[in-house]
Image: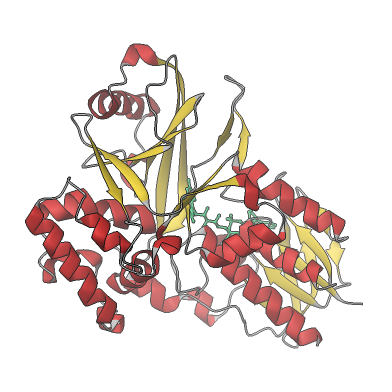
Amino acid sequence: MKKCVVIGGGIAGLTSAVYLSKSGINVELIESSNKLGGRAYSFKDPVTGSIIDNGQHILMGCYKETLKFLRLINAEDNLIYQDRLSIPFLNNNSEIFKLEATKLFHPLNLLMGLLNYNALRIEDKVTLIVFFIKLAFSNINKLKDITVERWLFKEKQSENLRKSFWEIICVGALNSSTKNASAELFASILKKMFLQGNESAALIIPKFGLSETYCKPAQKFLLNNEASISFSENVLELIIVDNSVKKIITSKREIEDFDYLISAIPLPALKKFYTDNKLAKIDFENSCIVTIHLWLKENPLSEKFYGLIDSPIHWIFNHGDHITLVISDANHLVNIDKNEIYKMCEDELNKYANITEGNISAYKIIKEKRATFIPSSDVLSKRPGVKTNVYNLFLAGDWTDTGLPATLEGAVQSGKIAAELVIKNYN
Ligand SMILES: Cc1cc2nc3c(=O)[nH]c(=O)nc-3n(C[C@H](O)[C@H](O)[C@H](O)COP(=O)(O)OP(=O)(O)OC[C@H]3O[C@@H](n4cnc5c(N)ncnc54)[C@H](O)[C@@H]3O)c2cc1C
């Protein structure tokens, strides 16, 4: 018997399950809710009947493992790909400034594009270009213990640059303000995103709801490969004897016929039934993302998405029948009444996109309080790897030590590495 149990049907668990079943291992995936996708799923809005996401997700060309995974499950056509980074930014006069990488000058296409980004003054463009050239040759380990804010200050980035560029990039990439995020992580992400040419920097967005885009294809792949998926089943306890998990106790049954176990659930859920010295020391601080879906009588927007300069709203995504506003780094909104958030959105939409109150026919606000963890230097140094002290238990999930922020790419990478270790142990 070659059997591995995977706990958690988010993208990390789905990745582990797909790679394991592809290599002929018998997989049982256990998910506590009644759906796949974890923190990235879609559902039918009961009022409007539209399929909407719990939160808009953006991928990038540098998400190499996610794109490989999507190809493997036959889902690559479910996404819209840019050929090079192009972001229309709006200011509070509804003016558009395009940040667009150039076709030529690989791998510095984005730096050349910055020259044409007219939300920035000429002196700021020069400062930015010097910053990126310096980054290309610098040792980012030196940034280990400082925040992004401190780093930008040391690098003499102006107030305007911070507002019109750095806050947007930092909040977008790390779901954290420059005040809290680790400069080392940010620098490594900037290198991956912006210094490796157009393919890496291009943005990729799902064509359909997230569940349609990747959960259903992953489920189909698993069922075709004879894996089993159990929904609404909560793992409650592990019986560990001699450094080996012998029994998994769930809300429905006891499981003993397995060799390996991959846990692909968030850390607080794991700590309810397993911890060790390393895990006990980690205390993640969560960062909320607020998503506001708005249905318009007439949609005046022509681009697929927009970044907003110096606004509490960071992005607008245009789905045709409705638009989605995204507010990242949103812990300050957790206890704010939804009507108040809606009023603020109305005001901003008026200023930034000429969309007036009378044009909005319905709205829905989703607060994801535990969207990601805040990647401070302290937390990053404590993230565990895939292996545990228990020989047949492996960890996956966006919170494990992938060298990446909490993203789909981090989750996929961790899920794949955990699966590869199990496969290696069988060989
Ligand atoms: C609003 C929002 C916007 C985001 N935007 C982006 C973006 O633009 N780009 C990007 O790359 N990332 C984004 N992210 C982050 C991304 O969604 C996550 O990093 C990723 O989905 C995490 O996947 P995971 O599999 O590690 O964990 P999860 O998705 O949390 O999956 C864990 C699963 O385990 C299950 N589970 C928990 N406990 C148990 C138990 N005891 N027994 C059985 N099952 C259990 C849960 O129900 C869940 O399905 C966003 C997240 C949110 C919330």
Tell me the residue at 35%/68% (across/down): 106
Look at the picture and state if 211 lies above or below 299.
below
Residue 51 figure quarter: top right
Q: Quadrant of the C terminus?
A: bottom right
Residue 225, x across and y down, in percent: 85, 61
Q: Going by the picture, which residue comes out furthest to the left? A: 123
Residue 376, x across and y down, in percent: 33, 68
Residue 23, x across and y down, in percent: 80, 73
Q: Quadrant of the N terminus?
A: bottom right
Q: Going by the picture, which residue comes out furthest to the top? A: 358
Residue 354, x across and y down, in percent: 27, 22
Q: Going by the picture, which residue comes out furthest to the front? A: 104
Residue 336 shows in the view: yes
In depth, the one of 249 and 368 nearer the eye is 368
Look at the picture and state if 285 lies above or below 184.
above
Q: How is the image coloured?
A: secondary structure
Tell me the residue at 87%/71% (across/down): 256
In depth, the one of 383 and 353 nearer the eye is 353
In depth, the one of 233 and 15 nearer the eye is 15
Q: In which quarter of the image is ligand 1?
A: bottom right
Counting labels gives 0
Q: In this view, does 302 lie to the left or right of 389?
A: left
Residue 178 shows in the view: no
Residue 360 figure quarter: top left
Tell me the residue at 17%/45% (across/down): 119
Tell me the residue at 72%/46% (across/down): 216
Look at the picture and state if 11 lies above or below 148.
above
